Image (cartoon, rainbow, N blue to C red):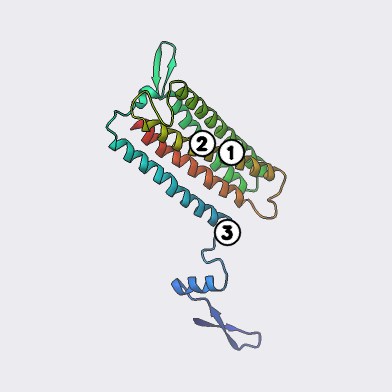
């Protein structure tokens, strides 16, 4: 541990200890119960939660790819399964394209909400969080319509008249798990935005908006992978 000389009022020099850097400094911070990484605990815990969720979604998608690559029964064509009948033609992936556009747009409104929050403009921040939540609700309703359409066509978790039986189980499991995350995110955003309007974070600061944004951006990113593996492959 190094020492520096700090002049005293009498003109003498008194040694002052400076915490060591590198690994020794990290161990010293942890041993003295300090913030070793200088990150708020709420933000750190959200990152840990998102990391654990990444492993879960990664396992689901890996299982999906394994099942699809190993099945001997033809896999349903996504352009036909997820087509919408518009007028006299079937438009492939129309609903999925709209869902993706809505969810990606919600990331933009969430990013603006975080920006306004750190400027101290809690009213615009809360308004943009409500807009983000509305986009999330639209996504969930469209996903419910997609599910109902496939169920009416005979797709089940244990069977599928369009091809490989594993299609139904993997589709409902992965998209349902993601839809649950979007629903939880919508509730989370509404609660935080409501408390934001009421001035509950005036003393604590507005980092809670950034933490909520981290969760929402993660949900959007996961959908990009689901979109690529399920609907484009």
Q: Which residue is drawn at 40% across and 35% down?
A: 170
Q: Position of residue 69 (x, y in %)?
A: 29, 37
Whole-number angstrom distance, CA of label 2 to CA of label 3: 27 Å
Q: Which residue is drawn at 49% across and 35% down?
A: 176
Element carrying mark 3: helix
The residue identified by callout 1 is: 186
Q: Nearer the viewer, residue 49 or 7?
A: 49
Whole-number angstrom distance, CA of label 3 to CA of label 1: 23 Å
Bin the neighbour count of mark 2 within 10 Å (Cα to Cα): few under 14, some 14-19, many 20 and up: many
Q: Position of residue 195 (x, y in %)?
A: 69, 45
The residue identified by callout 2 is: 179
From the viewer's perspective, tell me whether residue 121 is left or right of residue 93.
Answer: right
The residue identified by callout 3 is: 41
Q: Quadrant of residue 82?
A: top left
- The earlier-in-sequence mark between 3 and 1 is 3
Q: Are marks 1 and 2 in contact (CB under 8 Å)?
A: no
- The earlier-in-sequence mark between 1 and 2 is 2
Q: Nearer the viewer, residue 78 or 91?
A: 78
Q: Which of 206 and 141 is in front in this view?
A: 141
- The earlier-in-sequence mark between 2 and 3 is 3
Hey, which residue is sitting farthest front in the picture? 158
Q: Which residue is drawn at 51% across and 27% down?
A: 142
Bin the neighbour count of mark 1 within 10 Å (Cα to Cα): few under 14, some 14-19, many 20 and up: many
Whole-number angstrom distance, CA of label 1 to CA of label 2: 11 Å
Bin the neighbour count of mark 3 within 10 Å (Cα to Cα): few under 14, some 14-19, many 20 and up: few
């Amino acid at each position: 541990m190094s020492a520096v000389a700090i002049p005293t009022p009498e003109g003498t020099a008194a040694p002052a200890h400076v915490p060591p850097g590198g690994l020794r400094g990290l161990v010293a911070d942890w041993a003295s119960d300090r913030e070793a990484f200088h990150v708020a605990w709420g933000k750190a815990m959200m990152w840990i939660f998102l990391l654990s969720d990444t492993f879960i979604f990664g396992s689901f998608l890996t299982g999906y790819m394994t099942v699809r690559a190993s099945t001997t029964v033809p896999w349903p064509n996504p352009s036909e399964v997820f087509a919408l009948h518009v007028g006299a033609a079937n438009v492939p992936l129309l609903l999925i394209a709209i869902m993706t556009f809505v969810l990606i747009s919600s990331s933009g409104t969430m990013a603006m909400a975080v920006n306004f929050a750190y400027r101290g403009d809690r009213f615009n921040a809360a308004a943009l969080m409500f807009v983000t939540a509305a986009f999330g609700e639209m996504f969930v309703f469209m996903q419910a319509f997609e599910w109902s359409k496939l169920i009416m066509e005979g797709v089940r978790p244990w069977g599928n008249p369009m091809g490989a039986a594993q299609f139904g189980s993997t589709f409902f499991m992965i998209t349902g798990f993601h839809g649950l995350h979007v629903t939880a995110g919508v509730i989370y955003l509404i609660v935080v935005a409501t408390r934001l309007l009421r001035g509950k974070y005036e003393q604590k600061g507005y980092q809670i908006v950034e933490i909520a944004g981290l969760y929402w951006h993660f949900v959007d990113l996961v959908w990009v992978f689901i979109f690529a593996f399920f609907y484009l492959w």
